[in-house]
Image (tube, rainbow, N blue to C red):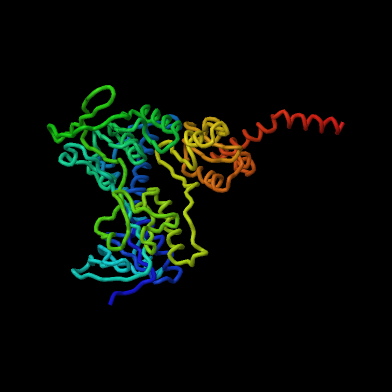
């Protein structure tokens, strides 16, 4: 007879760990099935290694610009002259954080952790090919949460597979720093890693078929970041299609491209593919469970139910947002809906979904872009700005590049965009503002420590307050009141 559980979670990445861990803490009989190792893409090939690489790259740039801070500038060199000094550091950081996602920790929470390849054999049963033996194991449950994540999407380009390439799954283990790196894709991953490798010493070209990089960002933010990258020496080729790749002498990859200017070629020692991601659904035999899916995702409703109402999905596999923090959020919603009675079920709310791109300077956003807001609200939209160059702390830190841009409709905040130092930290106040429909002047009601970068947020609230104080009606009232006091 199959073992029976209250909930079976498939996938041990960010979403799966949150759902299974939460269920275990609540005393739910829960099994967590993972094919490889707990932690998922974020820990091993995403957030953690990329931010570690980016930190090293920033330090290299600081060494080159040490004269700004009263020191001799230096050309950075790798320890023992080897790029492995960087990749070894990445490995150490991953191994440290890996302990937070150990199987023992989740077993202590009451989760049965099982390593193997699962597949549905009916709507309420899965069969697992166990990793540690040739045996199979069958589990049964009335509730499932699929959290199998995603993997890199590989474009169909003539000669690409034959010539070889890396994705985020291999790039952090490169043995040597590529002299010339071609990045396919101008999204967050491509731009973050492209800038980092350029700072470490690679000659970097970023190619994208879109008309601009970072197409999910506000257009002004995207254009400003492209200008910064060009000034750092990166070659940005937007509106450009790669037609083929071939190998030439010395294992060099010759890439043929085409855009409005014509056809041309670029030579690269390594190619990084970063054009997007697709859902991990292979091998699950979702048809047997009645779960609809497509090439990129498992569609869900607002309660995160799949087409099979007793089976939920959370994280990258849903295709909603491919961020660890959103996987965490969706997993909490999915868990609540799995185990709570109907009156307590909850819908996802993506109005205030934030994200950050960890370039230098950083980029962060929540809510609508200016184009989206103008299409929706027309002339009711007002745009407020504050420059990092006007912030005292930014000046002391030599972090004056960038700006904060706030979109408001009838003084209610509907979007916030930051290009600047620590944007990923500063955005959270705006997440609450968008979620709770704050008035723009509410930003001026919080007492903030001086000198901090957060004062740049208060500056925008002050702009709104000053505009009100300068209105003819306010001036007329004050004038009349002062006359009365006399």
Answer with the quarter of the image where residue 410 lies. Answer: top right
Does residue 25 appear in the picture of this structure? yes
Instruction: Judge by depth and name the residue closer to the eye, 188 or 390.
Output: 188
Marker count (numbered): 0
Q: In percent of the image, x 52 and y 35: which residue is there?
A: 405
The x, y position of residue 229, in whole percent, is 37, 30
The x, y position of residue 203, in whole percent, is 28, 31
Instruction: Judge by depth and name the residue closer to the eye, 324 or 87.
Output: 324
Q: Residue furthest bottom?
A: 1
Q: Residue furthest right?
A: 486
Q: In percent of the image, x 22 and y 67: which residue is there?
A: 132
Q: Is residue 306 left or right of residue 204?
A: right
Q: In percent of the image, x 39 and y 36: which residue is there?
A: 215
Instruction: Judge by depth and name the residue closer to the eye, 147 or 65.
Output: 147
Q: Is residue 406 left or right of residue 238?
A: right
- The quadrant of the picture occupied by the C terminus is top right
- The quadrant of the picture occupied by the N terminus is bottom left
Q: In percent of the image, x 31 and y 61: which residue is there?
A: 290
The x, y position of residue 32, in whole percent, is 34, 65
């Amino acid at each position: 007879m199959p073992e029976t559980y209250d909930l079976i979670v498939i996938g041990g990445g960010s979403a799966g760990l949150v759902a299974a861990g939460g269920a275990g803490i609540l005393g739910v009989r829960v099994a967590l099935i993972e094919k490889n190792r707990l932690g998922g893409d974020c820990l091993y090939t995403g957030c953690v290694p990329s931010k570690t690489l980016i930190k090293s790259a920033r330090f290299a740039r600081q060494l080159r610009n040490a004269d700004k801070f009263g020191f001799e500038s230096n050309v950075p060199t790798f320890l023992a002259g080897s790029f492995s000094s960087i990749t070894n550091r990445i490995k150490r950081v991953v191994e440290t954080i890996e302990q937070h996602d150990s199987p023992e920790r989740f077993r202590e929470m009451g989760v049965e952790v099982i390593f193997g390849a699962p597949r549905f054999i009916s709507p309420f049963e899965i069969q697992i090919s166990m990793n540690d033996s040739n045996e199979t194991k069958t589990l049964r449950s009335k509730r499932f949460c699929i959290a199998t994540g995603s993997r890199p999407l590989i474009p169909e380009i003539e000669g690409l597979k034959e010539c070889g390439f890396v994705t985020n799954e291999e790039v952090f283990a490169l043995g040597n720093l590529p002299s010339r790196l071609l990045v396919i894709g101008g999204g967050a991953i491509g731009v973050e890693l492209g800038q980092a490798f350029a700072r470490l010493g690679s000659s970097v070209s970023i190619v994208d078929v879109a008309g601009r990089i970072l197409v999910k960002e506000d257009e002004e933010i995207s254009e400003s970041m492209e200008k910064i990258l060009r000034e750092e020496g990166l070659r940005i080729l937007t509106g450009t299609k790669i037609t083929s790749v071939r190998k030439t002498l010395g294992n060099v990859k010759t890439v043929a491209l085409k855009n409005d200017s014509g056809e041309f070629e670029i030579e690269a020692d390594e190619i990084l593919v970063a054009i997007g991601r697709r859902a991990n659904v292979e091998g699950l035999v979702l048809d047997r469970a009645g779960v609809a899916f497509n090439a990129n995702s498992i569609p869900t409703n607002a309660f995160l139910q799949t087409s099979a109402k007793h089976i939920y999905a959370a994280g990258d596999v849903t295709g909603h947002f491919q961020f660890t923090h959103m996987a965490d959020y969706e997993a909490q919603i999915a868990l609540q809906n799995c185990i709570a009675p109907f009156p307590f079920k909850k819908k996802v709310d993506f109005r205030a979904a934030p994200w950050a791109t960890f370039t230098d300077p950083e980029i962060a956003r929540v809510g609508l872009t200016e184009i989206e807001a103008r299409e929706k609200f027309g002339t009711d939209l007002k745009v407020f700005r504050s420059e990092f160059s006007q912030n005292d702390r930014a000046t002391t830190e030599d972090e004056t590049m960038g700006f904060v841009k706030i979109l408001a409709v009838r003084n209610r905040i509907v979007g916030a965009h930051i290009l600047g130092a620590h944007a990923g930290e500063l955005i959270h106040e705006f997440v609450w503002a968008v979620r709770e429909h704050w008035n723009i002047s509410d930003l001026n009601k919080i007492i903030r420590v001086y000198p901090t970068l957060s004062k740049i947020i208060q500056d925008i609230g002050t702009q709104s307050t000053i505009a009100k104080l300068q209105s003819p009606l306010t001036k007329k009232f004050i004038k009349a009141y002062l006359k009365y006091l006399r």
